[in-house]
Amino acid sequence: MAAALASSRCCRRPSLLTIDRRRSSVARCALSGGKGNSFSWKECAISVALSVGLITVPPTFGWSAHAYPLEPVIPDISVLISGPPIKDPGALLRYALPIDNKAIREVQKPLEDITDSLKVSGVRALDSVERNVRQASRALTNGRSLILSGLAESKRANGEKTLDKLAVGLEELQRIIEDRNRNAVAPKQKELLNYVGTVEEDMVDGFPYEVPEEYNNMPLLKGRATVDMTVKIKDNPNVEDCVFRIVLDGYNAPVTSGNFVDLVERKFYDGMEIQRADGFVVQTGDPEGPAEGFIDPSTGKSRTIPLEIMVDGDKAPIYGETLEELGLYKAQTKLPFNAFGTMAMAREEFDDNSASSQVFWLLKESELTPSNSNILDGRYSVFGYVTENEDFLADLKVGDVIESIQVVSGLDNLVNPSYKIVG
């Protein structure tokens, strides 16, 4: 219910068209050809890769902590566009959970495949959707005992209840298909995947690893949290204001996520303007005055956090070095820059451990920069994804105001909160 409410909380002026995220992609590719001109995917990929160079020039308002890639190298185009990456933020978050339960993944996959099935025009898509639903239902029936055995004991009751809701929801989706109600499929699919995600989170028993001692006293998010960011959008005939729902992943970035939640609880971002919006990233977090990050009032010093990267297959993040510096050129990150609205920390170009309060959201089409070919993966700390209203990020401009960011769930996962210390 909460997710559904969040998705409707962008106030549009009546009788105007909804914004399409593809507009930003067209604008970037238009560098290679004007409106109406056609050009190949390869030319478009090169254009996008080259456009990264636009963010290597210091902005006019004098920041030093930016979302800049270090000496960007254009990947081989044959690698760049090979294989479809996962770009749905919900799917990325589900696969990023520290669990290993094949039975629930076999329910999850056909439900996610409904998205591709719906790409077929008209009601013909429903035949493919029906196959997806039957596969998911069969996997749930056959794998229920294995799924239940994977639940953490302290969360078992909630997990069982959610599985029951999932089973009922699958029956409801089957009836939707029988009624040939195509428009009702996607909302029900989202509901069912939310149930799957809840079950999978109920499989995580505690926090899976120890944060290194040198960072263990920092604010840490040991789990996940959800925040709502309300932005007042100025001078836009299409949108007045919008609430962006963001899921922060402390399982894979506890230091980075904890730092952000701590700043949110200090109201650090409330009233702050969007400070960069160039079609590639949206960025904010630079406070007024000479400081380029957060000054902790209890110490009078700038608080910085280390680069934090979780590699797929590892049990704990890597700290303080980029994957390139470590020679891990083919390593894939657990939280890749794949989704429109991927959230990460900005930092100084030549200091891996200089992130403080400046954050950015990436705006791009991930088909052109898949995981392990993206020049940002492994160089910047990703710690969350915008999961509701992400399309509207493309409409933000410099000067739009963040009215508030509020934690709506998961605050109990924050340990060592410095905002409670009177400075």
Image (cartoon, grey):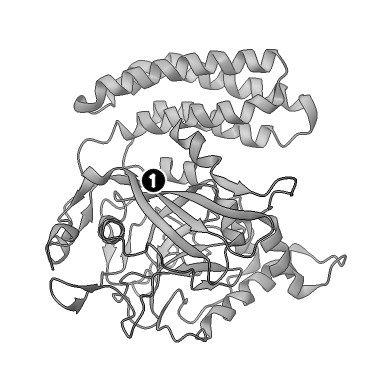
Residues 352 and 417: in front is 417
Q: Tell me the kind of residue under disc 1.
A: Ala
Q: Quadrant of residue 54?
A: bottom right
Q: Quarter holding the C terminus?
A: bottom left
Badge 1, how many Cα within 10 Å: few under 14, some, many 20+? some
Q: Position of residue 377 (x, y in %)?
A: 45, 64
Q: Is residue 112 visible?
A: yes
Residue 282, x across and y down, in percent = 52, 66
> What residue sits right under mark 1 in the picture?
96
81, above or below 185, in the image? below
Q: Nearer the viewer, residue 117 or 139?
A: 117
Query: Residue 78: x, y in percent?
Result: 65, 63
Q: Secondary structure at mark 1?
A: loop
Q: Residue at x 52, y 63 (%)?
A: 362
For image coordinates 54% across by 77% down, the residue present is 73
Query: In this view, which residue lies farthest toward the right?
Result: 36
Residue 166 to residue 270: above or below: above
